[in-house]
Amino acid sequence: GLGLPAFVAEGLVFRERFSLVQGRAELSPHIAASQRFMPGVTLVREGAVRQCQGTVLADWRASGPDGCAMGTGTNVFELDAEGRIVRVTGFWSAPSAPGS
């Protein structure tokens, strides 16, 4: 299968409310930690991806193991000339109400 180098630039910067990842080498441990400390939480894209000249917007929804929504948001991706992700900024919307 394709590994991170196929779609993530070496100098990746990923920022969101809970983390700051700098460099592709930090991304794999970050992904592993999220799976360890948030078991059963899923993040899925909501709706169509919007793209304009190397900038991509993707809305998402986080759900707990019980399927209840934990929050929603939008990620802004910046791509390099090869189409690899160089920068991601994640924006969280307000957390969902319990039971929604």
Image (cartoon, rainbow, N blue to C red):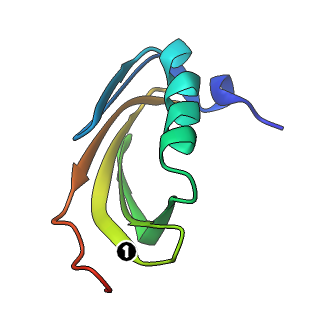
Residue extending farthest to the left is: 94
Whether residue 10 is situated above or below residue 89 in the rendered picture: above
Of residue 83 and residue 100, the one placed in the foreground of this image is 100
Q: Amino acid at mark 1?
A: Ala
Which residue is pictured at 30% across the width and 66% down the height?
A: 72
Q: Secondary structure at mark 1?
A: strand
Q: Which residue is mark 1?
A: 69
| Circle 1 residues within 10 Å: few <14, some 14–19, many ≥20 | many
Q: Is residue 94 visible?
A: yes
- Horizontal and vertical percent position of residue 51: 38, 54
Which residue is pictured at 27% across the width and 37% down the height?
A: 18
Q: Quadrant of the N terminus?
A: top right
Residue extending farthest to the right is: 1
Whether residue 19 is situated above or below residue 46 in the rendered picture: above
Whether residue 22 is situated above or below residue 63 in the rendered picture: above
Hey, which quadrant is residue 78 in on the image?
Answer: top left
Which residue is pictured at 30% across the width and 31% down the height?
A: 19
Q: Is residue 83 visible?
A: no
Hey, which quadrant is residue 58 in on the image?
Answer: bottom left
What number of labels is visible? 1
35 to the left or right of 62: right
Of residue 23 and residue 65, the one placed in the foreground of this image is 65
- Horizontal and vertical percent position of residue 14: 35, 30
Which residue is pictured at 52% across the width and 32% down the height?
A: 33
- Horizontal and vertical percent position of residue 36: 56, 39
